[in-house]
Image (spheres, rainbow, N blue to C red):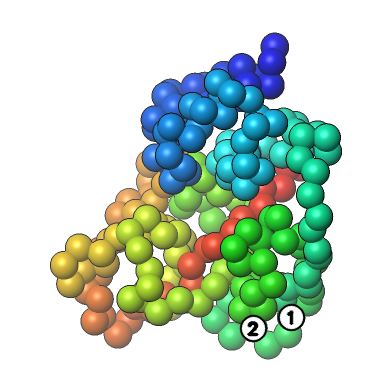
Amino acid sequence: MKREDHLKSIILQRFGTIKEFSRAIDLPYTTIRSILERGISNAKLGNVITICNGLGISTESLITQEDFVMESSTVAYSSYLHTQIQNPSSTEKVELPDIVMGKYAGDKDVLFTKMVEETVNKIIPSGSYIGIKEEPLMKLTDGDIVIYTYQEKQSVKKLYKIGNSLVFKPVSHDPKFIDSVYEATDQSLQILGKIVVYIVVND
């Protein structure tokens, strides 16, 4: 079976349709269809990484070094424990190549931790490494995956702005997670950051 056929079968098995998968990972349907039809080696590496992350599979299972020849620098980013997210008192360093960081390459404001929640596991499986960047509310757009606290309880969901309200939607295989709606002016609500990159770890 060709890699593209194998990839398509995984998408259909887990998401039902390519369009549904497209919506889940915020990658245009036409882009995914083009990759499946024209071949993985003709695709942008960033798109292939997004697809692999969305399916929870490693890039190595789809691509080889010969597919993409490029120069890439490696930068050290700060990492911290999940429990330290609001006030990281001590940090370690994690080194990541620019190709993984994409447009956030070299951005030292991106901090890394491990995903421990199941609220967005259709996109980011628990155990994945996530890169978080603090962003003001005005810069966040519908569909951004954010980490927030409400009355000191922390969660990770997709953010949508509707009027003066902020709607936080789960993207989970577990139906117990539901939407949360708060007023944007609610002082009990604090958005800690936006997930700008994630790395799926296969055990």
Q: Nearer the viewer, residue 201 or 119?
A: 201
- Residue position for label 2: 88
Residue type at tag 2: Pro
Q: Residue furthest left?
A: 163
**Quadrant occupied by the N terminus:** top right
Quadrant location of residue 95? Answer: bottom right
Q: Residue at x 67, y 37 (%)?
A: 57
Label 1 Cα crowd, 10 Å radius (few <14 / some 14-19 / many 20+): some
Location of residue 192 with respect to 128 vertically, above or below:
below
Q: Quadrant of residue 111?
A: bottom right
Is 51 left or right of 65, judged from the image as shown?
left
The image shows residue 187, relative to residue 116, as above or below, that is: below
| Local SS, label 1 | loop
Residue with the mark numbered 1: 91
* Alpha carbon distance from label 2 to label 1: 7 Å
Residue 26 on image: x %, y %: 44, 46
Most extreme residue toward the top is: 1
Residue sitting at x 58%, y 76%: 85
- Asked if residue 109 can be seen in this view, the reply is yes
Vertical relation: 187 (above or below) 17: below
Q: Position of residue 116 (x, y in %)?
A: 59, 58
Residue 131 at what x, y percent from top left?
A: 61, 65
Residue 82 seen from this side? no
Q: Secondary structure at mark 2?
A: loop
- Residue at 73% over, 85% down: 90
| Image quadrant in which the C terminus is located | top right
Pointers 2 and 1 in contact (C-beta within 8 Å): yes
Q: Residue at 25% of width from left, 76% of height from top?
A: 184
Give the quadrant of residue 78: bottom right
Query: Mark 1 is on which residue type?
Result: Thr
> 10 Å neighbourhood of mark 2: few (<14), some, or many (≥20)?
few
